[in-house]
Image (tube, rainbow, N blue to C red):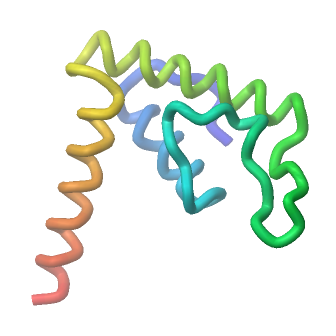
Amino acid sequence: MIQEIKTLKDVEKFIEQIAGEINDFHPLDDFHDYVYPDSHMRRYSDEEASNRNILLEWCFDICTQHTDDLFTYLLNLFQLEKASLQFEQK
């Protein structure tokens, strides 16, 4: 897991890591609230959840400094990824 968020590239790496961990990630959700769908047991320990929440806060800060906001940045990332996948399929 990435340890700090200092650049937009770090934001992208963090989001990719989180997307690999959970399918229903939403930037406004607290990581303490994520559970495994089958068992409903918490996905993250208190320490893991707190660390991810801090990293996510840093993502918001970095995006605010460089773009409109984290949501706009994520939307652009997903649109680029979708366009790339469509191009590869042709």
Up the image or down, 36 lies above or below 54; here it is below
Which of the 4 image quarters holds residue 78? Answer: bottom left
Q: Nearer the viewer, residue 17 or 30?
A: 30
Up the image or down, 57 lies above or below 32; here it is above
Furthest residue toward bottom: 90
Residue 59 left/right relative to 73: right
Give the total of numbered labels: 0
Which of the 4 image quarters holds residue 20? Answer: bottom right
Image coordinates for residue 62, horizontal then vertical, percent: 39, 17
Residue 70 left/right relative to 10: left
Quadrant where the C terminus lies? bottom left
Q: Nearer the viewer, residue 6 or 57?
A: 57
Residue 50 left/right relative to 68: right
Residue 31 left/right relative to 78: right
Residue beneath the point at 29% across and 22% down:
69
Image coordinates for residue 81, horizontal then vertical, percent: 25, 61
Quadrant where the N terminus lies? top right
Residue beneath the point at 85% across and 59% down:
40
Residue beneath the point at 81% across and 51% down:
43
Up the image or down, 63 lies above or below 49; here it is above
